[in-house]
Image: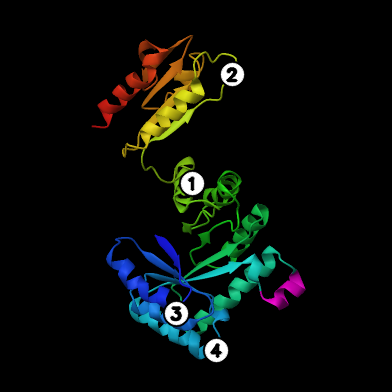
Amino acid sequence: MVRVAVLDMAAAKAIGQIKKQIHIPLVADIHFDYQLALEAIRQGIDKVRINPGNIGSEEKVKAVVDACKQKKIPIRIGVNVGSLEQDLLNKYGATPKAAVLSALRHVRILEKLNFKDILISIKFSNVPQMIEAYRMLAKKVSYPLHLGVTEAGTAFMGSIKNAIGIGTLLQEGIGATMRVSLTADPIEEIATCWAILRALDLRRRGPEMISCPTCGRTQIDLIGLANKVEKELKKIKQPIKVAVMGCVVNGPGEAREADIGVAGGKGMGAIFVKGKVVRSVPENKILPELLKEIKKITK
């Protein structure tokens, strides 16, 4: 699914045109102005992200809830540690407890209106706090939770923080949807998201490459080869596992679960399939020979 920020009425009205050109769910991210939520709903949005406590009177909240009920549209409550209510900040500080209490306030507003098609997010930029907050919330509600580390940073550090925070919770069975937050092209967010799911063996989509670090036994350009193989694998859709290993000491054994792989030697590489070496080739032939074997099982 894709979330879009709805800043004004022009953006809300554009949702209808966007919906005509896509085939995946579209979520409207709305703050404060309930009229934008109503217009997004009229335009065919699939989910609304809005905090009911921030849009004014009960009548305004009810108008949004009634519209969502009519079209069976869920509401995601999105609590961010940077925008907690002042009374909670004064009493508890910017803590997981304050964020959980804030989320529960918004939930109660919707439940009072007999609306329970709810998803909740409760985001921190601090990873340990994020994990603690979601664990606390998971014990208090049965609603699905949307995971994320907010303001995680640029692609490198942000990917690490997201992987630790989101990955820890998913491994514990907490979380229904997720968003990787990076100060980068959103395409990188999607790639990191899939990498987290693949690392936890929760999803298999496209090839997976495993490769070892360099060490004193490595006698080929392992880093260059791994990068080239990874680039080629982006063209393949089948969920195969490919190993690029630096030496024959541990290569085939450590990567025996791989469908296809290579273990480097002195200026050469041993191509193996399902852990068994099928032939050895000179270093300059490793990439084409490896791709040849990959092609055999991905036709």
Name the residue carrying label 1.
192
Mark 1 → mark 2, Cα distance in angstroms: 27 Å
Mark 3 → mark 2, Cα distance in angstroms: 57 Å
Mark 3 → mark 4, Cα distance in angstroms: 15 Å
Q: Residues within 10 Å of mark 3 (few under 14, many from 20)?
A: many
How far from the left and from the top, in percent, is residue 279?
34, 11
Q: Nearer the viewer, residue 84 or 92?
A: 84
Instruction: Tell me which amino acid carries mark 3.
Output: Leu
Name the residue carrying label 3.
36
Residue extending furthest toward the left = 299
Q: Give the range drawn in magenta.
A: 85-92
Q: Visible in this render: residue 130?
A: yes
Label disc, if present, on residue 215 of the rendered structure: 2
Q: Quadrant of the N terminus?
A: bottom left
Asked if labels 3 and 1 touch by Cβ distance under 8 angstroms, the answer is no
Of the residues tagged 3 and 4, which is closer to the observer?
3
Mark 1 → mark 3, Cα distance in angstroms: 31 Å
Q: How crowded is mark 4: few (under 14 residues within 10 Å), some or many (20 or more)?
A: few
Residue at the image position 37 percent from the left and 10 percent from the top: 280
Mark 1 → mark 4, Cα distance in angstroms: 39 Å
Instruction: Kindly state the secondary structure of the residue where label 4 is placed.
Output: loop
Instruction: Tell me which amino acid carries mark 1.
Output: Thr
Q: Looking at the picture, does residue 24 appear above or below residue 251?
A: below
Asked if labels 4 and 1 touch by Cβ distance under 8 angstroms, the answer is no
Q: Which numbered disc flags the more N-terminal residue, 1 or 4?
A: 4
Label disc, if present, on residue 57 of the rendered structure: 4
Instruction: Tell me which amino acid carries mark 4.
Output: Ser
Label disc, if present, on residue 236 of the rendered structure: none
Of the residues tagged 1 and 3, which is closer to the observer?
3
Asked if labels 2 and 1 touch by Cβ distance under 8 angstroms, the answer is no
Locate residue 80 relative to residue 89 in the image: left or right: left
Mark 4 → mark 2, Cα distance in angstroms: 64 Å
